[in-house]
Image: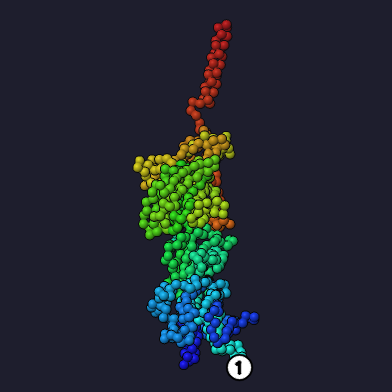
Amino acid sequence: MKLKRLFTAILSVALTLSLCAMPAMAEGATTAGAMPKTSTSTIDKNQKGSITIYKRALDSSGNAGTAGDGETMVSPQGAALKDTGFTLYQVMDTNTLLAYYNDNTTADQVDVKDYFTNYAENKTAAGLKTAYATAYKSEVRTDENGKATFTELPVGMYLVIETKTPQAVTMPVEPFLVSIPMTRIGDKTTGADNQNQKEWLYDVTVYPKNSIAKGTVRLVKQGKQGSTTTPLAGVKFTLNKKNDTDDDYTAVKTDVATDTNGKITLDNLAKGRYYLQETGYTDGNDKGYILNTTGKFYFDIDENGKAVKVDDTIAGKVDDASFTIDSTHATLTVTNYKPDIVKTVTKRDGTTTSHEADYGVGDAVPYTLTIKVPENITSLKTFTVTDTTVKAQLIQNKGSVKISGKNNAGGDVTLAKSAYTITVAPDANNSVMTVAFTPSALTGVAGGEITIAYTATVQSGAIVAGDGNVNTAKIVYSRKTNLTDETGGNKPYEITDKGVVYTFGLNIHKTAKGGTKDGAGLKDVTFDLYKKVDTETLNGNSKYPFCGQEYAAISGDDAVKLGLTTNSAENWIKVKTLTTGENGYVSAKGLPSGTYKLVETKTVNGYNLLSKPVDAKLNLTYAAAWSTTTTYDANGNQTKSTITTPTYKRDGADVTDPSAEIEIVNRAGFTLPVTGGFGTLLFSGIGVLLVLAGVGVLFSLKKKSNRA
């Protein structure tokens, strides 16, 4: 009877080892020279034993493999799991175990559940009954081979609990019992040498296995500028995984870069916690999108291999719209932001805006800078707008600057005066307007828009026609978020846009036809220059502003009399009086395009005034050579456009030189007879002489007569 009960007890222990929900397995094979320590059939209660645990992962099929026999396997199934913690509890001491095996107890067959208060509800160390709650051996972690060993164990029954589970494991192995010693239940020999159930095994090896979750997720990297998104190629990331031993993280993938579609596939990710961190761009792929190199994009891989959001509060965790996980839990999207700037000029009609317009010297040209604000604006150190002109051509008017904002829903936002500073500082060559924003004060316009409206006055040195008068707007912004030092490789990005103002000129050469000055230039000829009112509108003084001054319109009847028009309803203004200089030249520069006519008011003596006005040929149209092809330099700075010499037309015909000289000819007058002139006096003199001669003859004859 005792032998039967002993046999039953041995089989129960073996069954406990092999039938755990996540089974502990052992193999009879041993390495060369490392034969198991065995004894005779009598337990040596003074013998010390050991428990060696090799923690393994189930294969992809979930196959637990061969049941263990307490001895070391040559090639156990499953991958080794490092940093699994096991704690040992003694539930039977030497005498109790011997009594149990010798049937000196009335206790029923032992079961692992007997040592827990409520095994079904709590099978962790916290659920142990008080009598067994003190660890006999403190936690031991498995090494890189998945091995953990408890040594110097006296004869007894031990409960093994997995007290630290790797993140990759979906469920810890259930607690299991190990007897020191246990009857050897496996062997390597057959026949008479078969040691099965003939010896005690004091050094027991077990192979508990866990199921491991693995997932594959896709990282999508996109850039957002205003409302436009685009995939970003060549953005580098490091993937970090939380350690099982502490709260630190270890890089598991370094400097992996997005492909041409802005994607990275992250496969075979074991269950656990991860974070992605941006590290930079590959060569040639920096397009000015702001990197978040200090932020950490956290996510978990759950027991189903899916990516889920981390709700914990963690320092450095990115917890805004720049990081999202889709509803399938398979796609992670990381967004980088980038501002934008568009420079426009309002045309003289006041209703349309473009990158180019024409104005005259003295005009205050209305400009608008429209800035798309990045959503992460408050994380930036620098956010500054500059506008640069050639001082001799244009100078910004500081008092004209007006700044307004809109939020990301398009609603109006009033920016506090403390949110920016405005300066206009001319240097030797340029005039620079700077609007320096305080990013932390721009919360209301994050993801929205800022508008800067201002005027710049056209100067007397403005270029006439040609390439026009170009001014450059630029936004300067932080290269990365949360920077304190923006020198060296952290120098801010720049985005540049341009606008151009054209002015035109009138060049007159006044020449003589016939007379004493035939072919020569005529000096001191005067003209009045008139302009037809087209885009100009009456101001509060009932006058028309033009080139920085005010002009009253001449009456329609006067305009008809002058020959400017046949329509008395048209409005005209007299804008200049021009007088020719040496060799008959005179010019008027810095005029906007329009319909102009010259009325000659004085000419040179001997030459006739013109009978009607002369077309000044300033009714020009232009098509700017405006290239909107975006270019980037090696540092990711963007230039949005380039400007070259435009094409000009007059009355639909191409004009090579819109400021070409206009030759105006005055013809010599006719010489009329002059009454009472020198010719009459001559004849009168001759007559007087003849009369005197006659009188003299008469006196002479009279004297002769008297002598006679």
Classify 95 as above or below 640.
below
Classify 644 as above or below 16.
above
Residue located beneath label 1 in the image:
191
Give the position of the C terminus as an image quadrant.
Answer: top right
Q: Residue at x 49, y 56 (%)?
A: 481
Q: Residue at x 39, y 53 (%)?
A: 405
Q: Residues within 10 Å of mark 1 (few under 14, many from 20)?
A: few
* 397 or 513, nearer to the observer: 397
Q: Left or right: 460 with respect to 405?
A: right
Q: Position of residue 99 (x, y in %)?
A: 47, 84
Q: Secondary structure at mark 1?
A: helix
Q: Residue at x 40, y 59 (%)?
A: 408
Tell me if I can see residue 596 in this picture.
Answer: no
Classify 616 as above or below 7.
above
Q: Position of residue 647 (x, y in %)?
A: 53, 53
Tell me if I can see residue 194 in this picture.
Answer: yes
Q: Residue at x 45, y 62 (%)?
A: 314
> Residue lying furthest right in this view?
33
Q: Please, which colouring scheme is shown?
A: rainbow
Q: Position of residue 31 (x, y in %)?
A: 62, 81
Q: Amino acid at mark 1?
A: Gly
Classify 696 as above or below 683.
above
* 199 or 52, nearer to the observer: 199
